[in-house]
Image (tube, rainbow, N blue to C red):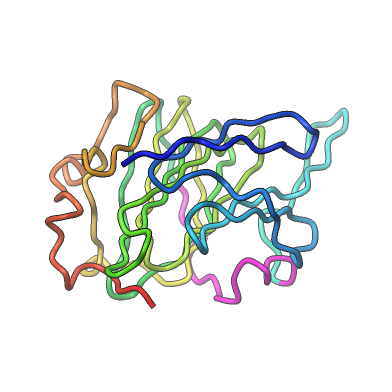
Amino acid sequence: MPSTCARCPDRKGAIEEPLRGRGGSRACDQRPGARGVKVTPTALPGVLLLEPRVFRDERGSFRETWHVEHYLAVTPLPFVQDNVSASRRGVVRGLHFQQPHAQGKLVGVSAGAAFDVVVDVRRGSPTFGRWVAEELSQENGRQLWVPPGFAHGFQSLADDTVFLYKCTDVYHPECERTVLWSDPALGISWPVGEAVVAAKDAAAPLLERMPAEHLPSFG
């Protein structure tokens, strides 16, 4: 059942209301060791909110989106494939994962904005079926680290939203799995009411009906 949202002070001292469902609120403590990027644990263990340092001046802005040394506090896994998608407002992509050949994903947005969702689909996990969400945008520069074993999806909040993925395993079409984006047991609060969904994603099963062999195991 859904849990309430905790309120955490941001780095400027203001109060922010994180978007959360079933998994609870974002933890307020931060993981040390990632130089140049603020790393904040979420309510799902292993899922991390990343805020790279942004340099702004009269020309615009500049930021690093990945650095092999600076991101060691996030994951030691190597990235082997990069993906880019472009979506109009309202498009939902997900909820996707691979099993076997599970992928870790470092995701972000280079144009527009997206409501980004991560769901724990690991059999035996104490947080199985729970989810967290963050708004990622070109303006805020945030990223999410999605570890192997979690399903991922997003809804575009603006036309021409460009979404970036760095993956720790290559795409294996025979291992692609999808959970229905509107699964009522998950209760994800997608912000744009008129969702645009691919036929394949619209036909995906509920999480409770996924064959056990299609789900990763916990631990």
Quadrant including the N terminus: top left
Q: Main secondary structure of the magenta part?
A: loop
Q: Residue at x 83, y 36 (%)?
A: 56
Residue 3 occupies quadrant: top left
Provide residue 88's location: percent of width, then percent of height: 40, 28
- Looking at the image, which is closer to me, 150 or 107? 150
Quadrant of the snapshot with the C terminus: bottom left
Residue 114: x and y, percent? 48, 35
Residue 207 place in picture, x, y as percent: 20, 53
The residue that appears at 68% across and 69% down in the rendered structure is 73
**In the drawing, does residue 176 fall left or right of residue 163?**
left
Residue 22 figure quarter: top left
* Residue for point 24% across, 54% down: 178
Report the residue at 59% width, 41% height from top. 110
Give the residue furthest to the top: 193
Q: How many marks?
A: 0
Extreme residue toward the right, this view: 58
Image position of 211 with respect to 17: above or below: below
Query: Is 104 one of the magenta-colored residues?
Result: no
Highlighted range, magenta:
69-84
Measured from the top left, where is residue 131 in percent x and y?
A: 39, 48
Left or right of 215 on screen, residue 210: left
